[in-house]
Amino acid sequence: MKTRFKTLDEFYKAVDALTERLVAQHHDDEAKRLHSLMHEIAWTTGSELLGELILAFKEMKGKYSSELTKEINECREFTLHHRRILGLK
């Protein structure tokens, strides 16, 4: 699946926007986890962050709006694709 993200910076901004949308729709636990991964943990490499984001997106099994589900899936697909490019699984 091809995503709309062309750069990591674009993707990171989308994750922040997703976090805000999760809060707005009262999915506070998921929002807190994404925020923590993005802003509260010092990662050695960007690939570590992407790996943790993959896990976070995979574990998101709440009842989301179709629009929010689409955004979560697109973010997850980007992380999977980007790690494949880096030669990681």
Image: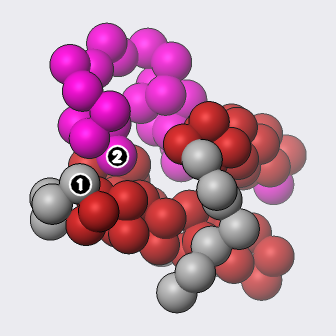
Question: Residue 5: where, in percent of width, then height?
Answer: 66, 59
Residue type at numbered disc 2: Leu
Other residues around mark 1 within 10 Å, as few (<14) / some (14–19) / many (≥20)? few
Mark 2 and mark 1 residues within 8 Å of each other at the beta carbon: no
Q: Quadrant of residue 87?
A: bottom left
Can you give x and y, in whole percent of width and height, for residue 43 in the image? 27, 20
Kindly state the secondary structure of the residue where label 2 is placed: helix
Where's residue 34, x and y in %? 51, 39
Q: Is residue 54 left or right of residue 27?
A: left
Q: Is residue 2 shown above or below 24?
A: below
Residue 69: which quarter of the image?
Answer: bottom right
* Residue indicated by mark 1: 86
**Residue on which disc 2 sits:** 50
- Front residue of 76 and 1: 1
In this view of the protein, can residue 46 be seen by the observer? yes
SS at mark 1 in the image:
loop
Q: Is residue 45 magenta?
A: yes
Q: Nearer the viewer, residue 40 or 88?
A: 88
Is residue 64 visible from the viewing direction of this image?
no
Residue 79 shown left or right of residue 44 in the figure:
right
Stretch of the chain drawn in magenta: 25-50
Q: Percent x, y for residue 46?
A: 32, 33
Residue at the left extreme of this rendering? 88
